[in-house]
Image (tube, rainbow, N blue to C red):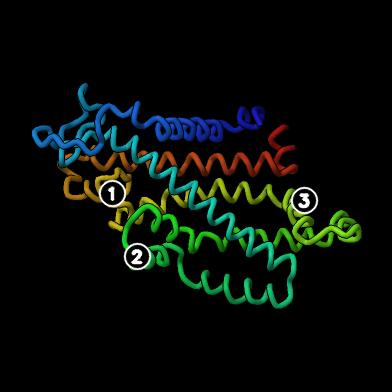
Amino acid sequence: MAASLRAQPLAALGLLFLVIFVVLAVFAPWLAPYNPASLDLFNRLAPPSHAHWLGTDELGRDILSRLIYGARLSLTVAVSVVALSFLLGLILGGLAGYYGRWIDVIINTFLMNAFLALPGILLAIAFVAFLGPGLLNLILALSIGGWVGYARLVRAQVLAVREREFVEAARALGAGDLRIFIRHILPNILQPLIVQAAIGMAGAVLAAATLSFLGLGVPPPTSSWGQMLNDARPYLFDAPHLVVFPAIAVALCVLSFNFLGDALRDYLDPRTRLTVGL
């Protein structure tokens, strides 16, 4: 893995930024210079300075502190959405691929295609608009459409592995379906799922920022990158730093996951691993 990172500087850069975001999220109470919800109306719209490295917003709140706490929210949403989508996709895709027949018809033909007929972001908007904003509703909303991609990938991988010799041997020895799937099939289909999960986190961060920008994310005073961008719209020309810094944070976080996903794909694929090694 270290050799792959040295051969792919963008992957190393993405990993570096991702580590920074994780550190900021975990140690936000100790790293943030100010309370992100603390108001200072006498210093509203202040440009970057020694007291406020990234300036203040329209209510005098420190932008750097809000970005640090926003990293905690974004990573929490990304990990939770990918974990829930991964689990649902693994169960439903595994059932469809392993058993086939009418189970495959119901899950793949009807259920998956029904969710694919509508864009995931529209389903998320409708879900949050119906139940109201909040962290749990935001995670559930993004997971509603996110599981389909994992389910289709799991189904395809299981279809390719379930007839292999080692699976037939385990079945002949009397192993149950659950044991065969967990012990013999799952380890052989994890590689593309890991890559999909890394790239899926980038999409989750971007989708969470989009919903927060539309006012459908976590309500104030919780710091959110998307909400910061929405609040900064009226001051785009008077105080551009209100838009620039949250936009940079979203872009770097999304790029970090994308670069890491590309690196994992190259590392886990033997064909591309040989190319990288050369």
- N-terminal of the pair, mark 2 or mark 3, is 2
Residue 38 lies, with reference to residue 158, above or below; the image says: above
Residue that numbered label 1 is attached to: 227
Residue 67 image offset from top left, x and y in percent: 32, 37
Q: What is the C-alpha distance between the residues marked 3 and 1?
A: 44 Å
Residue 210 lies, with reference to residue 44, above or below; the image says: below
- Binning the other alpha carbons within 10 Å of mark 1 as few (below 14), some (14 to 19) or many (20 upward) gives many
- Between 37 and 16, the residue placed more toward the observer is 37
Residue 157 image offset from top left, x and y in percent: 71, 58
Q: Where, by quadrant of the figure, is residue 43 drawn?
A: top left
Q: What element carries label 1?
A: helix
Residue that numbered label 2 is attached to: 131
Question: Residue drawn at (37%, 52%), measured in percent from left and top?
Answer: 135
Question: Residue drawn at (43%, 40%), measured in percent from left and top?
Answer: 253
- N-terminal of the pair, mark 3 or mark 1, is 3
Circle 2: residue type: Leu
Q: What is the C-alpha distance between the residues marked 2 and 3?
A: 39 Å
Question: Residue drawn at (34%, 65%), measured in percent from left and top?
Answer: 131
- Between 62 and 16, the residue placed more toward the observer is 62
Question: Residue drawn at (57%, 43%), measured in percent from left and top?
Answer: 261
Mark number, residue 115: none
- N-terminal of the pair, mark 1 or mark 2, is 2
Position of the N terminus by quadrant: top right
- Between 191 and 173, the residue placed more toward the observer is 173
Residue that numbered label 3 is attached to: 183
